[in-house]
Image (cartoon, rainbow, N blue to C red):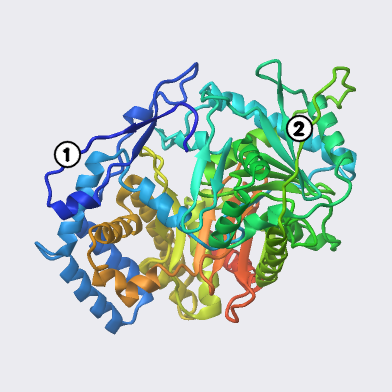
Amino acid sequence: MFSTAIGLSRQVVKYTMSNTMKQAIKPTACLMPLKAKTGRMFIHQRHLPKLPVPPLQQTLYRYLLSVKPLLSDFDFDTTKKLVDDFGRPGGIGEKLQMGLIERSKKLDNWLSQWWLDHAYLNFREPVIINSSPAVIFPQQSYTDLDGQLKFAASVVAGILDFKVMVDNQSLPVDKLGGSPLCMYQYYKILSSCRIPGSRKDSIVTHPADGPDPPKHIVVAHNYKFFSLEVYKDGWTPLTRSEIYQQLCDIVNRSQETSAPVGILTAENRNTWGKIYNQMNKDRTNRAIFSEIQRSIFVLCLDEKISSLPKEEFDNEVGRQLLHGGGSELNSGNRWADKTLQFIVGPNGACGLQYEHAPAEGPPIATLLDHTLTYCDNVCEDVAPVDNQLTPAKRLKFNLTPDVKESIENAKISIDSMIEDLELQIFKFKLFGKDFVKANKLSPDGFIQVALQLAYFKIYGESCATYESASLRRYQLGRTDTIRSCSTDSDLFLRAMADSDKSNSELVRLMRQAVESHKEYTNMAVFGDGIDRHLLGLKLMAIELGWNVPDLMMDTAYNISTHFKLSTSQVPAKTDSTLTFGPVVPDGFGVCYNPKSKHINFAVSAFNSSPSTSSMTLSLKLTESLAEMQNILVRGSMSAKL
């Protein structure tokens, strides 16, 4: 289930608590690299600290601060009473806190398996749009099929080049503020795959140093799947010219479309799990599933894209990468369970889609930066290949009438999902992160406050906002939540609506709001966030067989975790843009990549919600960023007078 150089050992746990509590804290697999091979990628791994359990009273105090701008005075007073009762000496909060502390002593990370299950594997909605992000690459210069296949060959060669560094552990250690980060996720993004279940999914990873390590990728074209060996003579990767020749052969062998079996992977997870289990009874299908799951990654060669004016090109590419464009376009040319799918379409449209369960965005961004840099540095054209290569193996499913009917149903489902999604991809060109830094402000905090202002302009109120914070300072760390909506941001928003406020006062409140965001970010990345702690307390109660505490059933808790703004900063070195769908029906998904002179944005919303429009939020966000720039410029001019 797990990846390269990761040893599986089961800890023996001795308990000193009540029998009920003993049953709740079950030992789980401890998965850590056992030893480095040739590099120093894991030199710091065993010395990374464990994720701490924050002090209970600290979390409860900060929780109250975070919900205050979202509640009426009456609702806030009600919530404060629940918080006081939960945190009283000897109360349920302290008992659950004890459980978390004991759990943290037994495991490398008290949260990671819970989070994997809660956020991903137990999630039963389709992963397309709802969970799996897409990354839009800068538009490439090719305009025909030959150029498309040459670029695809470069992408494959670049990924294999990156894989060498992961396999021999020579990848440089990621750092944050000089501190080393957990590198474990890099072992989970290649040769890994999600496997559907009728009630819960699982993940399988095939390590390069495991038995029979994978040497192939899977190529999808016209809904047909091919297994392509990308190594020869042991572990010598195919050259770019050899890969190109193999891709040409695959395209020539798949001129006509087949039944789009891949579209089943975009179904509801329970539905797909049942279909998968039925198909898996067939020996041929079972072998194909294994071939796809074991593959290093999937390469999708898209055949068509909607004809749209140039100003709509980015939006259409975003849609193609996020969901394939529908059953009549490329949604069947995907395998959504696969951790990494690199998608190369016509007219320079390309990018990737990744299944989110194994890893967060930063390791993916590192891989794509390396791959695109590799592609940019390719100088020579492909050359004729003299040696005879083994042709790619066609993966042809055996489809029963029931499966064929399920494919038709899946077409209807994904077309309905796609029809419901509104997506805006745009480049804010007025300024970039250099301007913000020149004013001694955090670019991320500045953008987050601008998002708050944009939402306030539309709805006249603040809203619960999620931004992911990396916990990779800790062993097996995943994420916590940065609650970007704060009392300070709310004060700034209301001041912006007050025409009597002076510019100097607006500058002061803006800086205060941005600084508040920075402080919360630092708190979260150092393991003192409140959301995962509260979730842990809730899950501990469930494991103990206790009722969910009243605090987690309160209106305030529901409001403050109903993230109408779900946001993420993915600062790739390349001019790329990540995108994903909203996490609540009446919310927005917002991702951004701040560059020196501009900012890339992706904003999504559901058409079925009458109260949301990604177009409207995008316009208000552009307006808010410009207004905040003007406030700072006027402030600087006044200071010089």
Residue on which the image places disc 2: 154
Q: Secondary structure at mark 2?
A: helix
Residue type of the residue flagged with mark 1: Lys
Q: Is residue 115 left or right of residue 215?
A: left
Q: Is residue 212 left or right of residue 181?
A: right
Q: Quadrant of residue 284?
A: top right
Q: x, y (%) of residue 215?
A: 65, 27
Identify the mark at residue 14; answer none if there is no mark: 1
Q: x, y (%) of residue 443?
A: 52, 52
Name the one closer to the observer, 547 or 553: 547
Q: x, y (%) of residue 172?
A: 51, 27
Name the one closer to the observer, 220 or 291: 291
Q: Count neighbours of disc 2 (C-alpha within 10 A) and say few if under 14, some if 14 to 19, many if 20 or more.
A: many
Residue at 21% x, 73% y is 82
Q: Is residue 392 left or right of residue 340?
A: right
Front label number (2 vs 1): 1
Name the one closer to the observer, 231 or 598: 231
Q: CA distance from mark 2 to mark 1?
A: 53 Å
Furthest-left residue in view? 90
Residue at 19% x, 59% y is 57
Q: x, y (%) of residue 635?
A: 51, 62
Relative vertical location of residue 502 with respect to residue 223 in this rendering, above or below: below
Relative vertical location of residue 629 with respect to residue 335 in this rendering, above or below: below
Residue at 25% x, 61% y is 541
Which of the two labelled residues, at mark 2 and mark 1, occupies the earlier sequence position? 1
Please say whether residue 601 is visible from this viewpoint.
Answer: no
Q: Count neighbours of disc 1 (C-alpha within 10 A) and say few if under 14, some if 14 to 19, many if 20 or more.
A: few
Relative vertical location of residue 65 with respect to residue 256 in this rendering, above or below: below
Residue type of the residue flagged with mark 2: Ser
Relative vertical location of residue 531 with respect to residue 302 in this rendering, above or below: below
